[in-house]
Image (cartoon, rainbow, N blue to C red):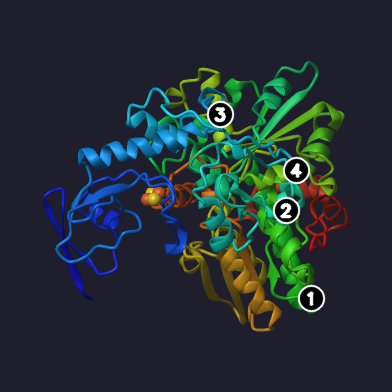
Amino acid sequence: MSLITLTINNKQVQVEKGATILQAAKLLEIEIPTLCHLKLHDGFENKPGSCRVCVVEVEGRRNLAPACTTPVTEGMVVKTNSIKAIKARRNVVELILSDHPQNCLLCEKSTNCELQALAADMGIHEIKYKGEMSTYAKDTSSPSIVRDLDKCILCRRCETVCSEIQTVSALSAVSRGFDTIVSPAFGTAMVETNCTFCGQCVAVCPTGALAEVNNTTKVWDALNTEGKLVIVQTAPAVRAALGEEFGLEYGKPVTGKMVAALRSLGFDKVFDTDFAADLTIMEEATELMGRITNGGKLPMLTSCCPGWINFIEHEFSDLLDSPSSCKSPQQMFGAVAKTYFAEKMNMDPKDIILVSVMPCLAKKYEAARPEMNSDVDIVISTRELAKMIKEAGINFEKLQDEDFDSLLGESTGAAVIFGVTGGVMEAALRTAYEWITGETLDNVDFEVVRGLDGIKEASIKIKDLEVKAAIVSGLGNARKLLNKIREGKADYQIIEIMACPGGCIDGGGQPYIHGKYEILKDRMNALYEEDKNKTLRKSHENPAIIKLYEEFLGKPNSEKAHKLLHTKYTNKEC
Ligand code: FES
């Protein structure tokens, strides 16, 4: 390994050959502002060097150098804060702002916008430059994502995440010069493209050019509609990140406070999607055992993640008999709420409004799919829930923990780990082990399937049966596995797939982390902590689920269960 020595702001530092000035400055804890540059998952980096916000002065060079793309050289002397560099950076931001709407107050990303933060840090209070402004029609075609090109700064982060990490390539730069935009091919509306609505583009967009469809007004309206019972379900990953929006430490599960906040907002019943995650395991494990014993299609692919389902429908339609037919926990919950729960409450399902709080933007699209019968009425993200709590003036930090309502609120530890990659697999193994062996599984922790790696493989012995499993997160990794299946080289019985790298903890609707992916570890640990603290940790031991089968569904994979809890997939290849 050859090392380079250079000086930045009068401090010497040694870095590996090939490193950039930005990387060297980081070692000295010197922050250089960036905008287009972003470190992404799996070692990917977005560094088109296009915004020029990171320019620094290098001794002996006439022109300023972009720190994010300029490699260090032996003896280099860099000044990050010379007056020339500071003025140039400010000029760059003023130029970007001259072609950017200035209605920040009304922007979905306000207070989370990196351009806004940069302008504030630089003390920019007026735009010196007046020129032509780009104006485009907003793309509001999808129920998940809004594209507002007027706010696009052409950093291409969305393109990198969509093409390199997710390998979907729904967005790319088109045209030239002032007319350049980042868009689906031929300006097609998002809903008509192969976009999976995973929302990873929204998560990395530094401005409001890509944002979620905000449904909070619909929820406020629902909560104030006379004669309706308004109930809410919350997905497992939400509790691992919601606290971040209120300044609480990373990785602090806030389940009890979240329940209390939802009650304060006015929901009549606060339920847990974890209940339906336990139900998913009952249905999915039964389906898997059936496929293994009856010579059904293997490997079976999990089907909880709607972004992943959109991906296979668009890109691998020849494999549509591989995913489990189980609906996602969100939709299983919806189906049970509008039938079993409605019956129990002696209510017309039309008088129940079900709101979902999800870490995911694809869940908005999923709920709107015609085959889901509008069981889930409104979907909001973790971020939208945080906005509602703030709008209502609730002091989140001071809330006392409260419990979910019974009937659809009981869950096990197996369900809460659905929110992280490997969690669905581990939950399924806990149940499959006991069903197959008839013995009690004392140590329920399957460490072998845990961790944030994009592709994991495991071979688990259950008596005489060897279960070969793969766990995948991120659609680029899913593509690799699906290609293996196509080639007949995937020797697995079951594969868990999540569209977002790391699973739902990194969903497109979670609080923004601005490239600090180390936070995902904290969110992951929050879920394993909650699992560990649960009295019941196996889905089939959930008493509310046992009761649901006894009173309503019969047994797993029964005709009634199939009608309500299973679905079909559609070939959407163009
Ligand atoms: Fe370096 Fe944009 S951050 S050029």
Residue bearing mark 4 = 367
Circle 4: residue type: Ala
Which of pointers 3 and 4 indicates the residue nearer the eye?
Answer: 3
The x and y percentages for residue 38 are: 42, 52
How far apart marks 1 and 2 lie (CA) works out to 41 Å
**Position of residue 484 in the picture relative to residue 516 (left or right):** right
Name the residue that disc number 3 marks: 107
Decide: few, some or many residues near mark 3? Use Cα within 10 Å; few <14, some 14-19, many ≥20.
some
Determine whether the beta carbon of the residue marked 3 sits less than 8 angstroms from the nearest atom of ligand 1: no
Mark earlier in primary sequence (2, 3): 3
Q: Which quadrant would residue 92 be assigned to in this image?
A: top left
Judge depth for marks 2 and 4 and give the one in front.
2
Please state the horizontal and vertical placement of residue 174, each as a whole percent of the image.
62, 54
Q: Which residue is mark 2?
A: 186
Left or right, 193 with respect to 134, comes to: right
Which quarter of the image is occupied by the N terminus? bottom left
Q: CA distance from mark 2 to mark 3?
A: 27 Å
